[in-house]
Image (spheres, grey):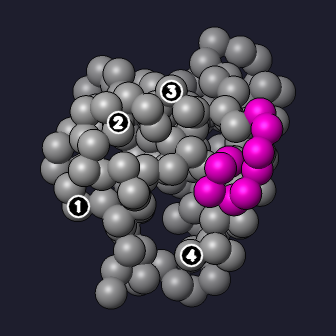
């Protein structure tokens, strides 16, 4: 059975599209991409916004992944309904989703909590920051995603 996973951040232009792209890359390298459907969305996304310039550059330079075609999407009822797991970048994102969709509470997880971390649970938003902050964020997300895959 295919597991549907959605990564969620604020605007779906930085963290969640990087997480989506990195996770897709990881599962492709492991040859298990057919076991998953991976998406991303934002709780306050403006539909069709591109990924941020720095996210595009970091993904290209550090991971050899092209994010140029990414377009932001707001999390909606259909996303929540079809997802098996929803990974948020912050506790605030998790709480917002659970407030709106209380029946989905058991499948909504803060990314860092899911892998067993107890402190500093939010993946810091790099929006508007420089390349190095985006790079640090992307590598932090990658490390977390390897842990996520081990726990699935």
Residue at figure coordinates x 63%, y 12% from the top left: 128
Q: Is residue 27 magenta?
A: no
Q: Which residue is label 3 attached to?
A: 92
The mark lying in front, picked from 2 and 1, is 2
Residue 68 appearing in the image: no
User: Quadrant of residue 11 in the image?
Assistant: top left
How busy is the neighbourhood of tag 3: few (under 14 within 10 Å), some, or many (20 plus)? some
| SS under mark 4 | loop
How busy is the neighbourhood of tag 4: few (under 14 within 10 Å), some, or many (20 plus)? few
x, y percent for residue 37 = 37, 68
Residue at figure coordinates x 46%, y 37% from the top left: 94
Q: Earlier in the sequence, mark 4 or mark 2?
A: 2
Foreground residue among 21 and 121:
121
x, y percent for residue 113 = 65, 50
Q: Is residue 51 left or right of residue 110?
A: left
Q: Which residues are magenta?
A: 112-120
């Amino acid at each position: 059975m295919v597991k549907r996973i959605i990564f969620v951040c604020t605007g779906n232009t930085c963290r969640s599209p990087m997480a989506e792209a990195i996770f897709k890359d990881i599962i492709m390298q492991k040859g298990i991409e057919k076991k998953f459907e991976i998406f991303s969305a934002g709780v306050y996304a403006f539909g069709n916004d591109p990924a941020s310039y720095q996210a595009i550059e970091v993904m290209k330079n550090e991971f050899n992944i092209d994010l140029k075609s990414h377009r932001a999407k707001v999390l909606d009822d259909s996303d929540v309904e079809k997802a098996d797991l929803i990974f948020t970048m912050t506790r605030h994102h998790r709480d917002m989703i659970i407030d709106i969709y209380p029946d989905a509470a058991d499948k909504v997880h803060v990314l860092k909590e899911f892998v067993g971390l107890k402190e500093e649970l939010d993946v810091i938003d790099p929006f508007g920051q420089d390349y190095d902050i985006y790079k640090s964020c992307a590598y932090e997300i990658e490390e977390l995603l390897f842990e996520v895959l081990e726990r699935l």
